[in-house]
Structure formats: C-alpha cells, structure tokens
Image (tube, helix red, strand yellow):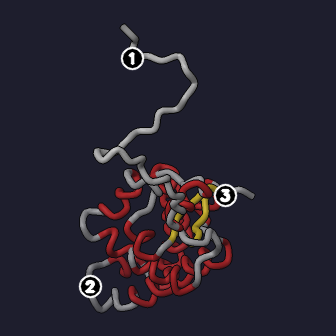
Amino acid sequence: MESSWSSSPERVEPRFGDGSAPPPRQRVDPTPGERADARFDYAGFWQRAVALLIDWLIVVVIAMPIIVVSFGADYFSLDPVRRSGDLVIAALVGALIVGFWRYCGATPGKLAVGIKIVDAATGGAPTTMRLVIRLLCYFVSALPFYLGFVWAAFDRRKQGWHDKIAGTVVIQETE
C-alpha cells in the first residue's frame, strides 16, 4: 500500500471542481491610504494629548494676562455685553493656530513633542484650506463628548475625526 505522502519535489496544483487550475494571482496595488501606512510613523494618542496640554498652557499663560490688562478682571463675568469680544479673540487664536500649522507644520506643543501635521495622501504640507477645515472640524470632534479626539486612540492611522474630514495625519517629526 502506498503512502499518501510523497517525497517527490513535484508541486501539486490545487484543482477546482471541474479539474482546472485556479487562475494566476494578480498583483493589486494598495490604495493611497494603505501606502501611507507604510510611509508614516503616526503620533499616538497620548503624545497628541501632551501636545494639546502644552498648547493650552501657552494660551493660558500668554492670553490671560493680556485679557486682564486689556479688558479687566470683569471680562470673566457671564455678562453677555462684557463677552462681546469673545468672537474676535477666538478668530485671532484660530488664525494663530492655522498660521503655526501652515508655516511650522505644528503648534508649539506638537513641536515640543516632535510631531507634525501632514497631508494624508501626499505626506506633504497640507494646504491652508485643508488646515482651516481641520480647525473648524475640531467642533465636530468635540461636540459628542470629545469622542472625535478620543477616536485617535483606536484608529489604525491615529486620526481624530477632524483629521479624517480634513484629510490630514499627525506623524513623528523625522528631521
């Protein structure tokens, strides 16, 4: 009786039900998003959280004294008349953030921890419009209990919702 194991080096091709060989495998190029995974070393959630904390500390240390000197301590009351300048201050801070992103690739906090923002498709610097969209989408990430920011902890590309919508990723600085 012959054994079903053969010591011959012949390769046995698997057969379909009709006895034919399977079609040859075709090479499938990865999508741009899949290619980006191999190129980038994504910044993790905690690294991004520390960068955000540094940024907020800078804003508080710099902005609060300026606000107190400019508007007085009464500025912090809940009176809507005294809070009328909030929109102007928010616009100035937003412009400053987009400016840092555009010209430095990151805010001071991100620079301090060695991470930067890049275009998810190209790996290059994002356009100014893409960065403005990213900033505005912070509201989308923040509204449902900051879930859009926490999402970065579980996403394979470490993107928050604002990153996904704007088409950006945050990566380790290599220079």
Between label 3 and label 1, give the one nearer the viewer.
1
Q: Which amino acid does label 2 sit on?
A: Asp
Q: Which of marks 2 and 1 is nearer the N terminus?
A: 1
Please say if the residues under marks 2 and 1 sit with CB atoms less than 8 Å apart: no
The answer to whether residue 99 is visible is yes
Kindly identify which residue carries mark 2. Answer: 79
Percent x, y of residue 128: 57, 85
The front one of 120 and 150 is 120
Amino acid of disc 1:
Ser
Q: Image quadrant for the C terminus? A: bottom right
Separation (CA) of disc 2 from disc 3: 44 Å
* Residue placed most toward the observer, 46 or 40: 40
When the figure is inspected, residue 29 is found, relative to residue 86, above or below; the finding is above
Residue on which the image places disc 1: 4
Q: Residue 109 carries which label?
A: none
Q: Is mark 2 on a helix, strand or loop?
A: loop
Q: Residues within 10 Å of mark 1 (few under 14, many from 20)?
A: few
Q: Is residue 100 left or right of residue 136?
A: right
Give the SS element for disc 1. Answer: loop
What is the crowding at mark 3: few (fewer than 14 residues within 10 Å), some, or many (at least 20)? some
The residue tagged with tag 3: helix, strand or loop?
loop
Who comes first in sequence, dot 2 or dot 3? Answer: 2
Dot 3 or dot 1, earlier in sequence: 1
- Residue underneath mark 3: 173
Q: Which residue lies furthest to the right in this view?
A: 175
